[in-house]
Amino acid sequence: MSITSFVGLFLSSFVFIYSLKLATPNNPMSIFLDYPSLFIVLGGTFTSAAISYKISHMFMLFKIFIKHVAGAYKVNYAEVIAEIMKIGDAYRRGESLEAHINKTSDFFLKEALELINDGILEGEHVVRILTDRANNMNYMHLEDAGKIKYLGQYPPAMGALGTTIGMIVLLANLGGEDAMKMIGPAMGFCLITTLYGSAIANLFVIPVSENLIEASKIGHVKNLIIIEGIKHLLNKANPVVVAEELNSYLPPRDRLDWKEIIGK
């Protein structure tokens, strides 16, 4: 994720907490802390997720999200195009791809160069394999992000469960001597579980899934650029032609100025 996403995550948390503060000018913030409510929402969400999916897989997806937040997962399209240009120009002049395979940090580009360097597959077959891999990877990443998004239904459902429990407690004690004393805590429990469920789903789970979807789309565009670059590499095209063709995938602000590369 970029710094913008990190700021958005921080601001959403700040707005939520500050809204609670504004809503209680004469009361401490501790009135919003209710451990039974938190246990129902978080515990119920976790157990429901454990039944639905592999927990280890869910943790892996959240790790990807954290990497995206920290900027460890980002794509500089111009750098990718520049690297393809340099590799293609070297290959056109008869250099081996071996050295470039070890230097590139992009896993998909490394795979593509290895397929060519092995010399077993024809050029069209290489491109077809890379296209299938890129599409399948994108499909799997979107599926995983969809699973995270689907988890967003559990916290509000657990909040509703907590609300139901609170209402049962409230109604069960209406006829007792301390009925009026029970109404406040029971209603508080009802509403706080709903608050927790809605906040967790809409401020964390769903934004995480949307962020993973964005990351998948960014990675897929990068892989499509690499595939197109490999086509030109196999045809030993002019580096300038390669740059202009690959720039067509990008908006003007992200495009590579190939004149700077040629001039070096």
Image: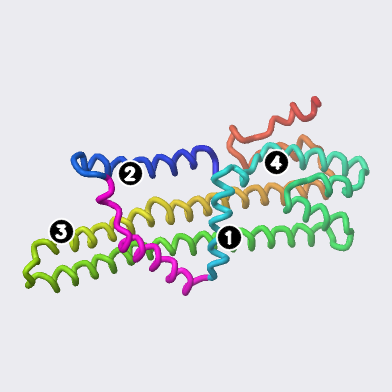
**Nearer to us in this view, 212 or 177:** 177
Residue at the location (38% across, 43% down)?
Answer: 12
Q: Which of marks 4 and 1 is nearer the N terminus?
A: 1
Residue position marked by numbered label 4 in the rendering: 245
Q: Distance between the residues labelled 4 and 1?
A: 36 Å
Check contact, mark 3 vs mark 1: CB within 8 A: no
**Nearer to us in this view, 173 or 67:** 173
Could you tell whether 186 is left or right of 154 in the image? Answer: left
Residue position marked by numbered label 1 in the rendering: 60
Residue at the location (87% across, 54% down)?
Answer: 117
The x and y percentages for residue 263 are 80, 25
Check contact, mark 4 vs mark 1: CB within 8 A: no
Q: Which amino acid does label 2 sit on?
A: Ile
Residue at the location (87% across, 40% down)?
Answer: 90
* Magenta-span inclusion, residue 200: no
Does 116 sit above or below residue 96?
A: below
Q: Earlier in the sequence, mark 2 or mark 1?
A: 2
Check contact, mark 2 vs mark 3: CB within 8 A: no
Q: Distance between the residues labelled 2 and 3?
A: 22 Å
Where, quadrant-wise, is the C terminus in this rendering? top right
Q: Which residue lies furthest to the top in this view?
A: 263
Q: How far apart are marks 4 and 3 (CA)?
A: 67 Å
Could you say which disc has been placed on residue 17 in the image?
Answer: 2
Where, quadrant-wise, is the N terminus in this rendering? top right
Q: Which of marks 3 and 1 is nearer the N terminus?
A: 1
Q: Which of marks 2 and 1 is in front?
A: 2
Residue position marked by numbered label 3 in the rendering: 184
Q: In which quarter of the image is residue 170?
A: bottom left
Q: Nearer the viewer, mark 2 or mark 3?
A: 3
Range of magenta residues: 29-53
Q: What residue type is labelled 3?
A: Gly
